[in-house]
Amino acid sequence: MSEKVLYALTGLFETPDQIIDAAEKTSDGGYKKYDVNTPYPLHGMNQAMKLPPSKLGYAALVFGLSGTVSALALMYWMAVIDYAHVIGGKPYFPLPAFVPVMFEVTVLSAAIATVFTMLFVVFKFPNNSHPLHDTEYMKSVSRDKYGICILAEDEKFDENGTLKFLEELGATNITHQYFTEDSYATWWSVLDKKFAGILAVTAIATSLVVYIGLNKVLYMQPFSWMMEQEKLNPQKGSVLFADGFSMRNPVQGTIARGDLPYEYAVDPEGASKLVNPLPITEANLQLGKVKYDIYCSPCHGFMGEGDSRLRGQFPNPPSLHSEKVRDWTDGRIYHVIAMGQNVMPSYSSQLSRNEKWATILYVRALQRSLNAKESDLQ
Amino acid sequence: MSTVDYSQELSVVEGRPSLRELDDLISKPLESKPDKKFFIAISFTGLMLLTGITALGASFIYGTGLWGNNNPVGWGFPIVNFVFWVGIGHAGTLISAILFLFRQKWRTGIARFAEGMTIFAVITAAMFPLIHTGRPWLPLYLAPYPNQHSIWPNFISPLLWDVFAVSTYFIVSLIFWYVGLIPDLAVLRDKAGTKVKKTIYSIFSLGWRFSNRHWQHYEMMYLILAGFATPLVLSVHTIVSYDFAVSIMPGWHATIFPPYFVAGAVFSGFAMVQNVLIFIRKIFNYEHIITLKVLENMNKIILLTGSLVGYAYAMEFFIAWYSGVQAEQFTFINRAFGPYAWAYWIMISCNVISPQLFWFKKIRTSIPIMFVLGVLVNVGMWFERFVITVTSLSRDYLPSSWAYYTPTITDFGILIGSFGLFFTLLLIFTKTLPVISIAEVKAVVDGAQPTHKDH
């Protein structure tokens, strides 16, 4: 830039009355692109400059109401649709209980939106490369002077005429303000080396902090969840016992009460020989249904069709109505419950022997419900 | 007396300082090196903070068993302190938003400072629910974000409302404070001596140009924010009171709780602001801006809210009797005459009796006396939260589980630490940002506004 381009003419005034007067005359004089800079807002300046009322209120209204609506919609979706469950005997959709959160979200979104709209949309801040920035003029109006600034791009502007005009108004320190190199900054100054450097450093630092925080710090002493406890774990050493193990073997030649060892642990086909000891009574089926609904239905579905309720967080099991399972003996199914099968875990610790057999009775009933025999018709 | 001319508004800033003098006066603490007094003060508060950090560190390593909390009093000190500090914060918003809507010009000198106190008080307060969970590094679980557990927070729990209320309150206060600071930062930018300072102020003042085309929107925005902050501040302590009132504990389950808590919050907050301002105006020579009149006005509000709180205490007793519910009646008799009677009577004498002295103008305008009364009010308000939380829990419906709650030394360490944190932040604030709003004060100096003679 060899040739300096004129941005505006500025002049200073000493008292609030003078500046109001000057602003009035400037707007009456037909100038449109001018500004008044004062250290604090002056009463009556809007009228003097004939500014239309600020429309920020609409931003607050629109964003506030969208906050209310989205808070309600989100809570409705979360508490009624996505994960409906009864809390404290209240209905799924207790509107009064949603009001506090709706209110807070309204205020939050309205406040943020109003300020952001003002700063970034209306004012187009941050803007530290404005031609008036860092001038003597700015330094005076930021403290105790009242300034007026008529832009060169105004239609009525002509350098000498406007200069005269300002003099007539009684302005002092009339100055030509020029565009600076900086004020031509455009969006690609984002690619500026310094800025890109700061961005890169911030990105690396943030990633490091997050990585170290989540993967290292969270596993340090006070953060070690409840993992570190004084109790003896099976694989831990112990000073209590002579052999140095914390695990104990059962006393030789004894078994715990009710704990008959399962002899076909590694022999599924052998288990086929087992016979269901329970008679088919209503009580047994009822027991089987209760246990099935609790322990099996989350994965296998209430009807055993493999329609899991776990939303894909665990592999869906095959249907229990397959020919394969229908043809299995009760003993073979018993083996699956007792030992698990591939990803399906063992249910030995949750179900007693009788309960396992009862569950099998119920599974059989389910199978019959879809594949009824001819004889069932009678 | 009769010579006062009520048709003329009294000036809120004494002595007609010139605008330039105001700039220099307010920004002086930022431009001068901190003196000895500052270092003494900050090492004192720093020591308090260190005590708190030590106590907290021990709690993290050895667990919350170091605290007095136990069955049946699960809420002990952390919740007492939380409610206390949130309450302190309320004065700031009241001064900056509600008094703004009521066009109380005397607020201009103290608004910035009180807002700062709000932010620091909320930071201090927010620490307590977090540590009270015992797993303060997992606060994200409080937020409704899609997580691998596939569950959402419980939106009908007052504790969750609290999360929303306090975080909204913090963010809105911070925004309010920051936009108020922008013009002042621009003043500092234009005054700045060194390049570093200038760069920092330039970044944070965003290129503010004192343009009247901007002031116009700015004033509108301020009005809107004040309009939102007013119901917000009322909602925050209302929701804090729901933490208690929505449960069915005797002594908590009362509809008077929300207004009673809000009054209490304003009460203690004003006492705290008054206490700190007494020092600030003296140390930084702001006596002309934060005039005795301002302090007197604050004392009047303390008197008003103190009486409201006293009324609420009485009403609680009345309702307990009137309800005919045995457990309620027992709780209140137990408060006044049970094992925690000492706390109850500290509360009554500090909160109900001592502020009544402010009826006398002599007392209202005597700095040493009002300082002492302010301290007493805060002691009383801390005990109020203690009485509410602890007496109800320690003797609830089931006499077999009654127990006496005794705080431990760790509890006190954390309490001291919270004061340390609050005051350390305040001290840093006085040295880094203008504690009085330069632009706002300039606008209310005599002769700062046009006379509009010719209209």
Image (tube, coloured by chain):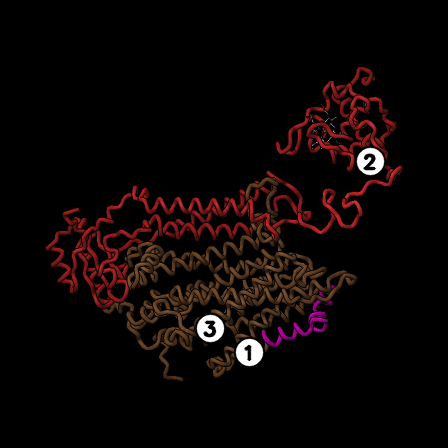
Chain colours: A red, B brown
**Element at label 1:** helix
Mark 2 lies on residue: A352
* Circle 2: residue type: Ser
Badge 1 local density, few (<14 within 10 Å), some, or many (20+)? some
Badge 2 local density, few (<14 within 10 Å), some, or many (20+)? some
In depth, the one of B246 and A327 nearer the eye is A327
Checking the image for residue B356, the label placed there is 1
Mark 3 lies on residue: B40
The subunit letter for the residue under badge 3 reads: B
Distance (Cα) linking label 2 and label 1: 72 Å
Residue at image position (37%, 47%) is A198
In depth, the one of A56 and B191 nearer the eye is B191
User: Where on the picture, by quarter, is residue A348?
Assistant: top right
Q: Nearer the viewer, mark 1 or mark 3?
A: 3
Quadrant of the snapshot with the C terminus of chain B:
bottom left
**Start and end of the magenta stretch?**
B326-350
**Element at label 3:** helix
Q: In the rendering, at what x and y percent does residue B395 appear?
A: 73, 64
Query: Relative to A247, is A172 on the left or the right?
Result: left
Is residue B144 shown to the viewer in this render? no
Checking the image for residue B49, the label placed there is none
In depth, the one of B114 and B235 nearer the eye is B114
**Element at label 2:** loop
Distance (Cα) linking label 1 and label 3: 35 Å
Whether labels 1 and 3 belong to a single chain: the reply is yes
Badge 3 local density, few (<14 within 10 Å), some, or many (20+)? few
Whether labels 3 and 2 belong to a single chain: the reply is no
* Circle 3: residue type: Ile
* Circle 1: residue type: Gln
Q: In the rendering, at what x and y percent does residue B302 appear?
A: 51, 73
Distance (Cα) linking label 3 and label 2: 71 Å
